[in-house]
Image: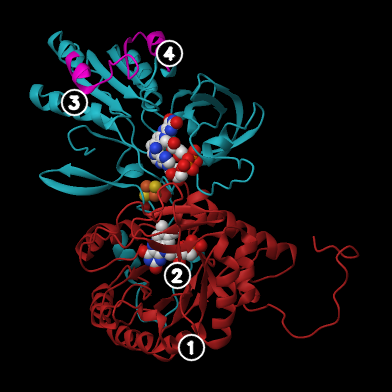
Amino acid sequence: MAIEQSVSMATAKDSFFIAAADDARPPRDWTETVVAERGEVLLNQAVNAEYRHLVVRCGPVAAKAVAGQFFQLLCPHPEGEQPFLRRPMSLYGVDPAKSEVEFLYKVTGAGTRGLALIAPGDRLDIMGPLGKGFDLDPGLRHIVAVGRGAGLATLAPLAKAARANGTRVTAIFSARRPDLLVSVDLFRGHGAEVITVTDSQGTSGPAHVERILRGLIADGRAEAFFTCGSSRLMRVQQRLAREFAIAGQVAMEQQMACGLGLCFCCVRDFHVGGEIVHRRVCWDGPVFDLMEALP
Amino acid sequence: MTVDLAVGIGGLRLANPVMPASGTFAEGLDKAVDFDRLGAFVTKTITRELRTGNPLPRVVERPGGLINSIGIPSKGVPYFLAHTLPYYGRFRPPLVVSISAPTAEGFASLAAELTRPGIAAIEANISCPNIEEDGKAFAMRAASTEAVVRQLRAATSLPLWVKLTPNTGDLPEVARAAEAAGADALVVANTILAMAIDLQTFRPSLGSVMGGLSGPAVKPIVLRQVFQCAQAVDIPVIGCGGISTAEDAIEYLLAGASAVQVGTATFVQPAAMTTIIDGIGRFCEKRDIARVADLIGAVVTEEADQPDLAWVAPAE
Ligand SMILES: Cc1cc2nc3c(=O)[nH]c(=O)nc-3n(C[C@H](O)[C@H](O)[C@H](O)COP(=O)(O)OP(=O)(O)OC[C@H]3O[C@@H](n4cnc5c(N)ncnc54)[C@H](O)[C@@H]3O)c2cc1C
Ligand SMILES: Cc1cc2nc3c(=O)[nH]c(=O)nc-3n(C[C@H](O)[C@H](O)[C@H](O)COP(=O)(O)O)c2cc1C
Ligand code: FES
């Protein structure tokens, strides 16, 4: 019907088009569901040698973020560097009552170096919430979350949401060294059981993680997989998911410019219905069906 | 005072002069911007056939700008007609469809197929490789520009906008060729051919080696090109390049643009376009300019007395 209404508008090139102001159509009700706002930084501190914890006071739209969604942060410029684009960061925590969002980030380049400079009381331009988050079926009794590196940040709000549903979580955390593991206490605080594996202890290899996962499956503790941050561990879960018909979701990363599905720079290949298709990580994801993801 | 923001572009009246640049706009922006406030919609360039776009990485940032080699991923015309067209039908601003094809013939048949209700104008992106000319973009030369625009003109009764490339020696000549062949308006310009190299790997930063520079870094160059083109032709020129604030947009209007397109700025500030619309309105109000159209081409270039010193009569 909407098309018919505009029919009269597209005629010969000389006819004047109706300006929006005198358009007969009534204004639509529109409310923004993504905002870019200058939130007040409440905390920005190191949690270990690699990760920093950032807490920002935000407005009501941002505070509606859910597990698996992300924000695009406009990072301050560190001296001598000019990061131009925003940087994507997963939601690490959200408190709608206090209007706060949290991030856990690793200082890797110009943008995150700039982020590390801000102090409580400063303003930070956060844009979000963006993307499709985890789909957590409240009927699940026991799920497994497997994360490595910054992937642990992405899974953290999932543990909280699972607890609210009465779903039990077993988390397998992977890192290079034990001192680089983050969020272990946070997950335990949400009632999750946490198993840690590290490169330095020789426990993080896919074969070892597969043995742990097989044990959880045998115990009936793996009704679904949720994973982020490691393609090796994702492949292990895909194999087990196929073998035991277990559902799963994975949060993916890709370099991003807009975060809103406009630019098509964040595409990745996915395996869908026997075909390889491109999808935009920011728009179609960042959370995808475990079986459709390609490393 | 209420400022009249409306502008006319070759038979099309826009409620205000601000619209998105092709390739930097899609449905997702509706989450952050009230679409009914825009002057027009401009789609990502579409092609007849399905295309996947260029290899990754497709974007690299540089101070003040972005180099992209997205290419033209396209779901093809049937998808566009079935999904994209009805989607935009529910909003007020007119829909401008950006098209591309590897041959003049291909451009014409695509324009003919898209000459249908719901589409207000065609924007021909002639900055992409022309296979008949050994991969040189149509818009790089006046002769190939004239040839493709002539075929397009014969194929559609819709207003025809032609988007030029800044990567040519004599842009005003190309602009005149497009006008002579029947373009209703010119979009100046597409991205500036550019490159970046990764010092860790010694490899080009983009998967396809070269890409197009956009963002604040290109504004002074494209502003000059808009000025030159507006002098060269009688049809409206739409300015596009590095606009991120109302001040940028006003500079373009003063240089001779009848409207502006905003691209890369939206990636950094999703509400850039509506912020710019508001800012243009405030600027006109402050200076008692009743109609935004009065700003078009109002740059003062003739000789005048020495202006008052800034500290005696500050501008603002
Ligand atoms: C959806 C999503 C969620 C993320 N969540 C987190 C998180 O919670 N914590 C965290 O520490 N990191 C996270 N990342 C990775 C983080 O965005 C990058 O580490 C960060 O952008 C690097 O920026 P930089 O300026 O420090 O580095 P630079 O080297 O300057 O980055 C250059 C460019 O590459 C992009 N880029 C670099 N690395 C990555 C990457 N791994 N993924 C995507 N883009 C990248 C940047 O956006 C930027 O455009 C996430 C990435 C995505 C896509
Ligand atoms: C990611 C990206 C994709 C683009 N895709 C197209 C396109 O499909 N068709 C087109 O005519 N221009 C395309 N452009 C060029 C823009 O429309 C515009 O001409 C250019 O970015 C300059 O404006 P800006 O500095 O405001 O971004 C693209 C630009 C960017 C940054
Ligand atoms: S970052 Fe632009 S489409 Fe995903």
Label 3 amino acid?
A: Val
Q: Tell me, yes or no, whether the two marked residues, 4 and 3, touch with CB atoms within 8 Å.
A: no
10 Å neighbourhood of mark 3: few (<14), some, or many (≥20)?
A: some
Q: Is mark 2 within 8 Å of ligand 2?
A: yes
In the rendered view of the protein, which quadrant contains the N terminus of chain B? bottom right
Residue that badge 4 annotates:
A186
10 Å neighbourhood of mark 1: few (<14), some, or many (≥20)?
A: some
Pick the residue in front: A140 or B305.
B305
Tell me the number on the disc at residue B190.
2
- Whether B39 is drawn above or below A217: the answer is below
Residue that badge 3 annotates:
A236
Q: Under tag 3, what secondary structure?
A: helix
* Left or right of residue B211: residue A280: left
On what subunit does the disc labeled 4 rest? A
The cyan one among the chains is: A
Label 4 amino acid?
A: Leu
Tell me the number on the disc at residue B173.
1
Badge 1 or badge 2: first in the primary sequence: 1
